């Protein structure tokens, strides 16, 4: 017997084990830690919506598929809407031939949300979305990078997985050349004196200033201070991606914008959000580059 039903607290151990087996085989990550993560981010999420729950695919009494529901409260042209983003979408190999994934996704998309979207998807999952009537917005998500040590980055990528003196020698040589290039060409480094000053971003800063800074956005989050406090705490937990940095850029009493990113010294620091009006975007980006340039990547 198979069924699709909302996630229950008693399912968390099976969901965690399923996720680790499929998505992180051999990682050695503890099941209890993964179960606690799913509990915090699904059942205890401040915006968890009982009308749009996370779902499990149960076969012969065992959880063999899962799709997490991550609901955002937003406004579209000033009107409140519910936006659902499915995540951590996994099924066991034995039920994939029975279209368990497609059934889970189809069930999720039939919920009462106003919009369902995902940022990335494998080719197989993308085909599921398209067959269920979704549209691909190819230009809706673009990536960019600011590289501070191009030669070092290239050397480490080319020599990844190799140990010993040759790798260390090549890396040190490239690091020295990159440092010299930064000194000789100021355009390669972050601005020495960007406009405004950077301070720790608080929930109140976002709640107070998003309506003005994001006034041109027809669709934008309806943030609350309590939700942002929870979100900052969750994002700040130890992660493989690095240490969370969140700054607001002020000039006098005015807020020019803010940014959040994961600082990963010796690695790639990934930006989570940059928010600024078109007029002040350059200044906010300069502060971001100045902050992250200590990472020199």
Image (cartoon, rainbow, N blue to C red):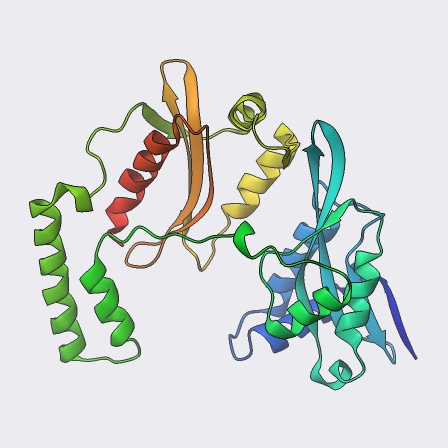
Residue 186: x and y in percent read 14, 41
Q: Specify the quadrant that holds the C terminus.
A: bottom left
Which quarter of the figure has residue 217? top right
Residue at 55% over, 74% down: 24
Residue 82 lies left or right of residue 124; in this view the side is right
Task: Give the answer, above or below, for where 164 lies relative to 156.
Answer: below
Q: Specify the quadrant that holds the N terminus.
A: bottom right
Residue 288 lies left or right of residue 235; in this view the side is left
Task: Give the answer, above or below, for where 166 lies relative to 129.
Answer: below
The reply to whether residue 84 is visible in this rendering is: yes
Which quarter of the figure has residue 58? bottom right
The reply to whether residue 8 is visible in this rendering is: no
Residue pushed farthest right?
Answer: 1
Residue at 43% over, 21% down: 255
Residue 191: x and y in percent read 22, 35
Which quarter of the figure has residue 157? bottom left
Residue at 65% over, 30% down: 224
Task: Give the answer, above or below, for where 132 lies relative to 290.
Answer: below
Residue at 30% over, 79% down: 161
Residues 126 and 135: in front is 135
Residue 2: x and y in percent read 89, 76
Residue pushed farthest top?
Answer: 253
């Amino acid at each position: 017997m198979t069924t699709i039903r909302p996630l229950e607290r008693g399912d968390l151990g099976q969901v965690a084990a399923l996720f680790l087996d499929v998505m992180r085989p051999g990682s050695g990550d503890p099941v209890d830690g993964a179960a606690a993560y799913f509990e915090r981010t699904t059942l205890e999420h401040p915006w968890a919506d009982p009308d749009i729950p996370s779902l499990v695919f149960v076969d012969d009494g065992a959880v063999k598929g899962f799709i997490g529901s991550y609901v955002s409260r937003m406004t579209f042209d000033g009107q409140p809407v519910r936006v659902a983003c499915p995540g951590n979408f996994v099924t066991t190999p034995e039920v994939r031939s029975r279209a368990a994934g497609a059934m889970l996704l189809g069930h999720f998309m039939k919920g009462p949300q106003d919009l369902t979207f995902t940022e990335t998807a494998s080719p197989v999952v993308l085909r599921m979305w398209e067959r269920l009537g979704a549209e691909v917005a190819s230009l809706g998500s673009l990536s960019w990078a600011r590289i501070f040590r191009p030669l070092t980055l290239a050397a480490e990528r080319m020599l990844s997985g190799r140990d010993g003196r040759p790798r260390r020698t090549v890396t040190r040589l490239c690091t020295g050349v990159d440092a010299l290039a930064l000194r000789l060409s100021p355009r390669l480094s972050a601005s020495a004196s960007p406009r405004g000053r950077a301070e720790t971003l608080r929930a109140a800063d976002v709640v107070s200033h998003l309506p003005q800074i994001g006034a041109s956005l027809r669709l934008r989050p309806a943030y609350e201070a309590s939700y942002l406090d929870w979100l900052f705490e969750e994002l700040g937990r130890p992660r493989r991606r690095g240490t969370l940095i969140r700054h607001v850029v002020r000039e006098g009493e005015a807020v020019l914008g803010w940014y959040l990113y994961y600082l990963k010294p010796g690695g790639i620091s990934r930006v989570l959000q940059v928010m600024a009006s078109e007029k002040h975007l350059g200044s906010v980006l300069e502060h971001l580059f100045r902050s992250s340039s200590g990472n020199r990547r």
